[in-house]
Image (cartoon, grey):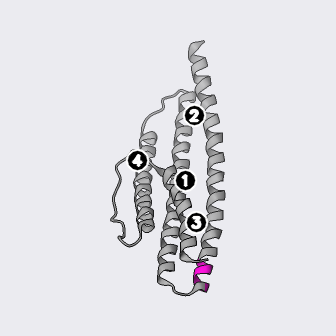
Amino acid sequence: MNRRGLRVLVGSVLAISIAACADTGQRQREPAPPDDPVLGLLSNGIAQLNVNINMVSKRMNDVQQSPAGTDPALQELQALDLSGWRLQQQQWVLQRNHLVLTRDTLQQVQLSREEKTQVQMLAQWQQNRRQYVKAMEDLRQQRQQLESKHLEAEARLIERRLQ
């Protein structure tokens, strides 16, 4: 596979990953390499994920610092909120690591002139991508279960208050 084919593959993954990690927080900007806009997009995505990871760490700390009181339902909701933030952090770390690997692989491909080396790098990247997709799916399933538990806990709390 040539460099163009690798870039097309990476571009599609990049678009999905960046869309998934978009956030309204302030973005740290890294200058895009003028000769390769794909590397620039990857670097920007990595910078945004670093901001998101730092932000979620602060939110988790806030949740841990706020007292839930003695109400078991509120304590349960606080624990579920914290678990949700941890899952979000894991997702962003996973996405960032995948983008870093992708960026580094593209940079290595640019330096390599051997077709065999490029094919090996593509195979390694594709293997990592399969693992990445599986890990993301696992996190999505965990998140769905957590959201269901959170909704049930909220409903119990509200029902108890309305009785």
* Sequence-first disc among 2 and 4: 4
Quadrant in the rendering for residue 45: bottom left
User: Amino acid under label 4?
Assistant: Lys
Quadrant in the rendering for residue 2: bottom right
User: Amino acid under label 3?
Assistant: Leu
Dominant SS type (magenta): helix
Give the image location of residue 23, x and y in percent: 43, 47
* Sequence-first disc among 2 and 3: 3
Residue drawn at x 47%, y 83% as measured from the top left? 111
Q: Which residue is mark 4?
A: 58
Give the image location of residue 36, x and y in percent: 41, 70
Asked if residue 59 is among those painted magenta in the image, a careful observer would answer: no
Indicate whether 135 appears above or below 36.
Answer: above
Cα separation, mark 4 vs mark 1, equals 16 Å
Indicate whether 157 appears above or below 146.
Answer: above
User: Amino acid under label 2?
Assistant: Glu
Indicate whether 34 appears above or below 151.
Answer: below
Tell whether label 3 touches label 1 (CB within 8 Å).
no
Q: Which residue is mark 1?
A: 91
Q: Which residue is mark 2?
A: 76
User: Amino acid under label 1?
Assistant: Gln
Instruction: Give the residues in magenta.
Output: 116-121
Residue drawn at x 66%, y 63% as measured from the top left? 130
* Sequence-first disc among 1 and 2: 2
Cα separation, mark 1 vs mark 3, equals 21 Å
Q: Which mark is residue 9?
A: 3
